Amino acid sequence: MVTGHVVTKPSATPHLALRLVTDVDLLLADTIASLRMNQRTIVLDPPSSLAACERCQVAYAQARETISQAGGITKWMEWICRPVVG
């Protein structure tokens, strides 16, 4: 049983409701940081302790779908890291 956590890491607190950032945003931001630091990509390999949480399953699926729609992790990172013009 999952007692409480944020979507990216287990903790002793319930989900935190952030006003400007969604669970999917947090997962995608964590993915960018993980790839840049050559660390485990949590969105592709979530902690087993979060598997029982329906909210996490939905967030992980949405984040993976975002990456998939971009053409995969490499294409998504290229798009995210592109220079902003204007």
Image: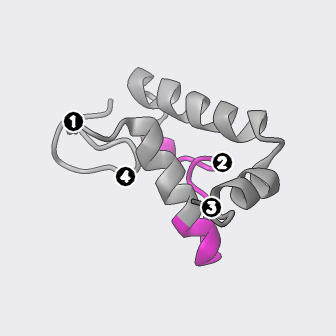
Disc 3, disc 4: CB below 8 Å? no
Mark 2 → mark 1, Cα distance in angstroms: 25 Å
Magenta segment: does it hold 37? yes
Compare marks 1 and 3 and give the one earlier in the sequence.
1
Mark 1 → mark 4, Cα distance in angstroms: 19 Å
The amino acid type, in three-letter code, at marker 4 is: Lys
Compare marks 1 and 4 and give the one earlier in the sequence.
4
Disc 1, disc 4: CB below 8 Å? no
Label 3 sits on residue = 85
Q: Position of residue 83 (x, y in %)?
A: 65, 66
Disc 2, disc 3: CB below 8 Å? no
The amino acid type, in three-letter code, at marker 1 is: Arg
Image quadrant where one finds the C terminus: bottom right
Count residues near mark 1 (Cα–Cα under 10 Å), then give few for <14, some for 14-19, many for 20+. few
Q: Is residue 24 left or right of residue 46?
A: left
Q: Which region is colored magenta? A: 33-49
Count residues near mark 3 (Cα–Cα under 10 Å), then give few for <14, some for 14-19, many for 20+. few
Query: What is the secondary structure assignment of the residue under circle 4?
Result: loop
Compare marks 4 and 2 and give the one earlier in the sequence.
4
Mark 3 → mark 4, Cα distance in angstroms: 35 Å
The amino acid type, in three-letter code, at marker 3 is: Val
Compare marks 2 and 1 and give the one earlier in the sequence.
1
Q: Position of residue 40 (x, y in %)?
A: 61, 65
Mark 1 → mark 3, Cα distance in angstroms: 28 Å
Label 4 sits on residue = 9
